[in-house]
Amino acid sequence: MAPSSIELEKTYKDVLRRIDGAHTRFRQTNDLRRRPISYSVRDKVYRKNYVLSDATKHFTAELAPKYIGSFEIKHKLSPVTYELMDTRNKNKDTWHIKDLKSHPTDSSAQSDSN
């Protein structure tokens, strides 16, 4: 016997309510660990160092510095993407905000109020 349309509608609304509740709980948990920060043009930052170990060169990635720099922000491409330039004004790269860290002498990094 097929369920009636009233039962299906009731079940559908219940599922939507539960999904909305799960979304709210997940968002609260996730936002606790979010680092709300934004940088301005010309701010000094460090960027994350991605390296691999190399036995032939006797290099261990675990002992390499986690962040390298100092780099200067040249352009803000989006709220989470920045174009960096090294101090010699030669190398331009695009980096996500999760890979950036404020330079200790630069106090102009702003915390978002989201």
Image (spheres, rainbow, N blue to C red):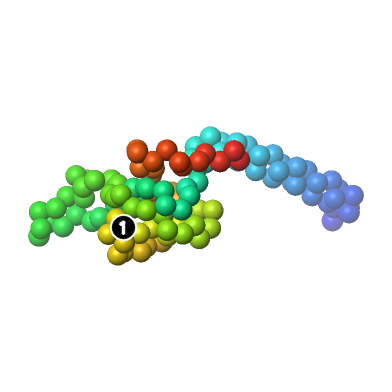
Which residue does the image show at 9% across and 60% down from the upper left? 56
The crowding category of the residue bearing disc 1, from other C-alpha atoms within 10 Å (few below 14, some 14 to 19, many at least 20), is some
- Residue 47, image x, y percentages: 34, 50
Question: Which residue corresponds to the image point at 48% horizontal and 49% vertical from the top-left?
Answer: 40
**Quadrant of residue 5 within the rendered picture:** bottom right
Residue 113, compared with residue 54, is above or below; it is above
Q: Is residue 13 left or right of residue 98?
A: right
Residue 73's x, y, as percent?
A: 41, 54
Q: Which residue is located at x 10 percent, y 54 percent?
A: 58
Q: Position of residue 77 (x, y in %)?
A: 50, 60
Q: Which residue type does callout 1 highlight? A: Asp
Q: Which residue is mark 1?
A: 86
Closer-to-camera residue (76/52): 76
Relative to 66, residue 2 above or below: below
**Horizontal side of residue 45 vs 110, given as left or right:** left
Q: Which one is nearer the viewer's eye here, 4 or 44?
A: 44
- Is residue 36 shown to the viewer in this render? yes
* Quarter occupied by the C terminus: top right
Quadrant holding the N terminus = bottom right
Please report the residue visible at 30 percent of the width from the left and 49 percent of the height from the top. 70
Image quadrant in which you'd find residue 20: top right
67 and 27: which is toward the camera:
67
